[in-house]
Amino acid sequence: MYDMRINSHLQRFKPTCGTTSGFLSTIGGWTKGCILEISVRQYGSPPHRAAVLHGGPGVPGYMAPVARELAKIVGVLEPLQSANSLEGQIEELRTQLVDHGNPPMTVIGSSWGAILALFLAVRHPELVEKAILIGSAVFDAENSDRVKTRRLERLTQVNRARHDTILRELTQASGDERERLFAEWADIFFEADVYDPLTRDLEVLETQPDLNEKVWLDFKVLRDRPNFLAGEFSKINVPVIVIHGEYDPHPIEGIRPFLEGCLRNVRFEMLPQCGHYPWIERRAREQFFEILTRELQ
């Protein structure tokens, strides 16, 4: 029930107020003045033993294609995060999995969702059987700067100039205009994040720039505290599988050494000719789903 395109690959989720179902076939949604009441979409038949976590933070919905494919073999939850703090997102996710899933679960996180999956495994190990990280974000400020540099280097001159303009305008914008600018900014970076995409439609339901800013600020405070993240994630005892595209602007050099240094059981699956979203990559999609299917069986 997607009724308004924002741009070439981002969509807004616009529901009728008061809808409460969490099932894909009867999605409600969001509009100005309404609360997003759908917190979890369910795919396949119970028991739901897997969950897919979107990135951003603040761009819910884009893991739907992954959930639909995996629902052929297992019941899948797609939590739609709305909490505007890191601690709030962890607690929100705990509640979603307990209320709708069948823990312990295989938790599959993309980008920011990969980080959230790790925090969940630390705080609520009883809920997580295995964590799968897709296109994980990085774990230090230096490599975060490298992500920005790689993305900007891949942009055309026109898009680079527009990117700089958007960042200036975002500091003054609010409301719908701020959301529009944030969606355009994401659209520009989409070009830098993909290798050979089958589609430009990520099926994003809503862009949430204020949530994005607040949650990232929380994370950066912890990230920049010496040895904090390594100490936290060293408490994880479940298997962790990292799936990463070789063309992903998030450098694996900023991910692999860190995770190998703090996790007891971690394995890496590198996908050639693949960017940040493997399920839409023409040359990596098949291998990507083969890996996920194997991990879920």
Image (tube, rainbow, N blue to C red):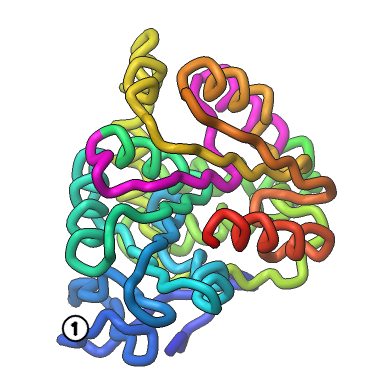
Residue 126 is inside the magenta segment: yes
Assign a secondary structure to mark 1.
loop
Q: Position of residue 83 (x, y in %)?
A: 23, 52
Q: Is residue 51 above or below residue 213?
A: below
Q: Residue at x 56, y 67 (%)?
A: 66
Which quadrant of the rendered structure holds the N terminus? bottom left
Which quadrant of the rendered structure holds the C terminus? bottom right
Q: Residues within 10 Å of mark 1 (few under 14, many from 20)?
A: some
Q: Residue at x 27, y 64 (%)?
A: 102
Q: Position of residue 160 (x, y in %)?
A: 71, 43
Part of the protein shown in magenta:
123-151
Using residue 226 as the reference point, say whether residue 88 is left or right of it: left
Camera-side residue of 171 and 184: 184
Decide if residue 172 is in sight here: yes
Using residue 192 as the reference point, say whether residue 99 is left or right of it: left
Please identify the quarter of the rendering in which residue 293 is found.
Answer: bottom right
Q: Residue at x 67, y 30 (%)?
A: 252
Camera-side residue of 134 and 70: 70
